[in-house]
Amino acid sequence: MEYVSTLSENDIKVSSVAGEQFQRLISDVEDDDIEAIRIYVAGGGCSGMTYGMTFTDRRSDYDRVYEGDGYRVYVDAVALNYLRGAEIDFVTRDTGSTFVFNNVFQATGGAGTCGACGMAGGGGCG
């Protein structure tokens, strides 16, 4: 079985607005060693996983690559298990502009809420 190193729209989706922001961020970086945006997943307690992004200057053997117009996104195999089927979007709200991960719980079967208290999004139980 061959390891597929590219990501498709079936793996993750990047909205056109998010893609434009990725392209802008990469073009604004002054460090020539930066080659992509890395999406990562970290444990988040009872509220679920935490999703984030950072710049990266290298690709690991286990990264899958999403090629956008003027940017690349790297996602390692573990993070992809939690992101498969998600859409990355960029939204502007009263509190500011930010990237959001939509439908991230679709892939893992979670509800996005705390099982003990039913609260959504962060802060923990209690």
Image (spheres, grey):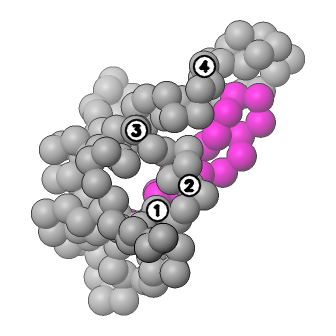
Are circles 2 and 4 on residues that touch, CB within 8 Å?
no
User: Residue 78 occupies which quadrant of the picture?
Assistant: bottom right
The label nearer to you, 4 versus 3, is 3
Q: Which structural element holds mark 1? A: strand
Front residue of 25 and 13 = 13
Tag 3: residue type? Gly
Q: Which residue is mark 1?
A: 75
Q: Residue at x 48, y 70 (%)?
A: 1
Q: Amino acid at mark 4?
A: Ala
- Give SS at disc 4: loop
From the top left corner, tell me how far across and down residue 104 is, in percent. Answer: 49, 34
Highlighted magenta segment, given as a residue range: 37-54
Q: Which mark is residue 85?
A: 3
- Where residue 72 appears, as percent x and y from the top left, is 29, 68
**Among numbered discs 2 and 4, the one appearing first in the sequence:** 2
In the foreground, 66 or 41 = 66
